[in-house]
Amino acid sequence: MKLHEYQGKELLRHFGVNVQEGKVAYTPQEVKNIAVEYAQPVVVKAQVHVGGRGKAGGVKFSPTAEKAYENGQNILGMDIKGLTVNKVLVTKAVDIDKGHEYYVGMIVDRNVQSYTLMASAEGGMEIEEVAAATPEKIIKYRVDPVKGLQPYEARQIALEAGFKGNLNKIADMMVKMSKAAFERDAVLVEINPLFVGEDGIPVALDTKFEIDDNAMYRHLDLASYREVAEEHPLEVEASQHGFAYVKLDGNVGVLGNGAGIVMTTLDVVNRAGAKPANFLDIGGGAKADVVYNAVKIVSKDPDVKAIFINVFGGITRADEVAKGVIQALEEGILTKPVRMRIAGTAEDEAKALLNEKNSDLIKMYPTMFEAAEVAAQEANAASGKGA
Ligand code: GDP
Ligand code: MN
């Protein structure tokens, strides 16, 4: 679960991180009121779940309350990478020219089976370019998963990264960020910019904070941070049905029973010359209504031009799968061809049901390769791509 900047800052504050003061506003008038209350220059910042808001015009320095109002008017309702801005964070501004913008972050790193801490003196809006062009300017450090980040380690990293200012305080901020990551099961935490002004004191101006969805049961106090309206509508619908669903960028909708078979199916679609539009696992033992709901979700995706269902019937009965698909067809939900490989338990019953229905939209194939081939060709033809 991705958190908004203001939510991430709230969490970091709990861990003692020195965070730039700010309040959330939903209207330009609220923006102005906060600016008047602070009686100093402010920054108006779009709260959406994407990075690079600054470059997209979603972060504006506002020297006066009038200017803050105006910036609030422009940013609220703005579209940033497909997301509408419904609220802004109004923060007390720092004088960015009189100091340095540094970067610190932590990610779960499978390669080292722990967190990797990253630090760079070249923070701010260009960190992606730094990572691409001059990766040596980003210090990486494996944090011990049992001991966590120790203050002496943090001081060493701050030195090595070339940070200037009160290094004890900067290291302390890194240690606190690290505690926040561990205790809140973060998959990612970033403070960028970590600003160090003329007094040498670090302050967190921006944060990205993402919590492992599988650990959310341990953080029920954060459930209210989740904003269903800000998530992909199909992912929300899928999670309501308990499906593991991931939106991908291709044109073949993919559905299978079990994570392993779905992953194989993605590969098979690729091999057939098309790209999967999603990953959807209906789980084991799915009945017709579950299949129906899954087909409904995949059909709603405008990118999907053909659907490939790959089910190996063990506990899952092939005839239940067929019934679910047929129900979707009968209700007019199914407008795209469904190509299926359903083998195993009750395969013959499934075949009989489909033969009876006799629709060009639903067809069964003896192997997954044949089904994938047809689905890929049809999807590519519908998307205007060569096979
Ligand atoms: P992002 O673009 O989504 O990462 O948003 P940030 O919150 O990191 O802000 C982008 C940029 O806005 C920063 O790199 C700073 O250059 C600038 N900025 C952020 N906060 C302040 C501030 O308090 N004062 C000034 N003058 N600039 C700021
Ligand atoms: Mn940032």
Image: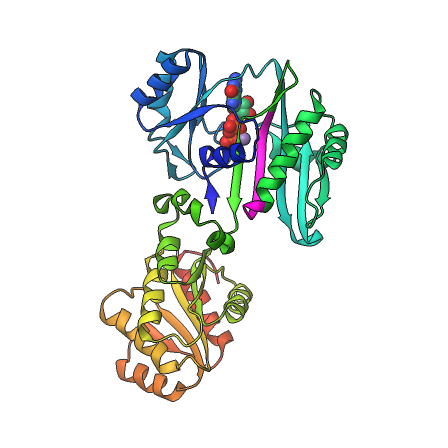
Q: How many marks?
A: 0
Q: Where is residue 346 in the image (x, y as percent from the top left)?
A: 39, 87
Is any atom of residue 202 visible in this view? yes
Q: Where is residue 233 in the image (x, y as percent from the top left)?
A: 35, 51
Is any atom of residue 360 visible in this view? no
Q: In this view, does 236 lie above or below 356?
A: above
* In-front residue for pair 120/114: 114
Relative placement, left or right, of 252 versus 128 is left
Q: What stretch is highlighted in magenta?
A: 183-194
Q: Main structural element of the magenta stretch: helix, strand or loop? A: strand
Magenta run includes residue 191: yes
Residue 350, located in which quarter of the rendered image?
bottom left
Residue 239, located in which quarter of the rendered image?
bottom left
Q: Position of residue 360 (x, y in %)?
A: 31, 74
* In-front residue for pair 183/311: 183
Q: In this view, does 297 lie above or below 316?
A: above
For image coordinates 38% across by 88% down, the residue present is 348
The extreme bottom residue here reads: 348
For image coordinates 35% across by 21% down, the residue present is 31
Magenta run includes residue 111: no
Q: Position of residue 82 (x, y in %)?
A: 40, 40
Relative placement, left or right, of 74 versus 258 is left
* In-front residue for pair 203/345: 203
For image coordinates 52% across by 44% down, the residue present is 210
Relative placement, left or right, of 242 versus 12 is left
Q: In this view, does 268 lie above or below 277?
A: below
For image coordinates 75% across by 37% down, the residue present is 153
